[in-house]
Image (cartoon, grey):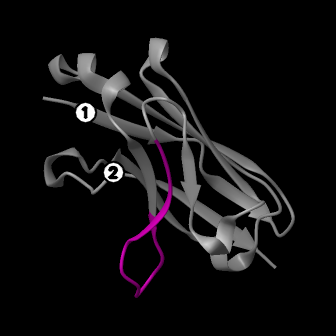
Amino acid sequence: QVQLVESGGGLVQAGGSLRLSCVASGTGSIFFSIRTMAWYRQAPGKQRELVAYISSSGGTNYVDSVKGRFTISRDNAQNTVYLQMNNLKPEDTAVYYCNVFGGSPGYWGQGTQVTVSS
């Protein structure tokens, strides 16, 4: 079993920054370091979408809409994955979730709300 707990969301003005964190815990977290981890988001009335992912070796990939503004990173010793979000835009408003790449159904947490005001 793995529990993923997201934090760091909040209300910011357009152009601001936030840093999200996702901590993995539980008996399955020992495998965290070998998993490709990802951040997803779901805006009101829209489907959940992949935002960024990071491989076990640190390779990263981003959806076009966040390239150059968001940075995903990880600390395997702390079982934590981060999402640094800069130059936030109102269209970034969503609930942000972390999960393994591909989105394992049993790993979805509560997410963390990010609201960007114009």
Which disc is residue 74 wearing? Answer: none
Horizontal placement of 88 versus 51: left or right? Answer: right
Please give the name of the residue rendered at 16% of the width and 17% of the height, measured from the top-left corner: 27
Which disc is residue 3 wearing? Answer: 1
**Image position of 116 with respect to 39: above or below:** below
The residue where tag 2 is placed is: 101
- Residue 49, horizontal then vertical, whole percent: 42, 71
Measure the alpha-carbon separation of dots 2 and 1: 15 Å
Image quadrant containing the C terminus? bottom right
Quarter of the figure with residue 100? top left
Please give the name of the residue rendered at 46% of the width and 19% of the height, measured from the top-left corner: 76
Q: Earlier in the sequence, mark 2 or mark 1?
A: 1
Tell me which segment is drawn in magenta: 41-54
Q: Is residue 85 visible?
A: yes
Amino acid type, label 1: Gln
| Label 1 secondary element | strand
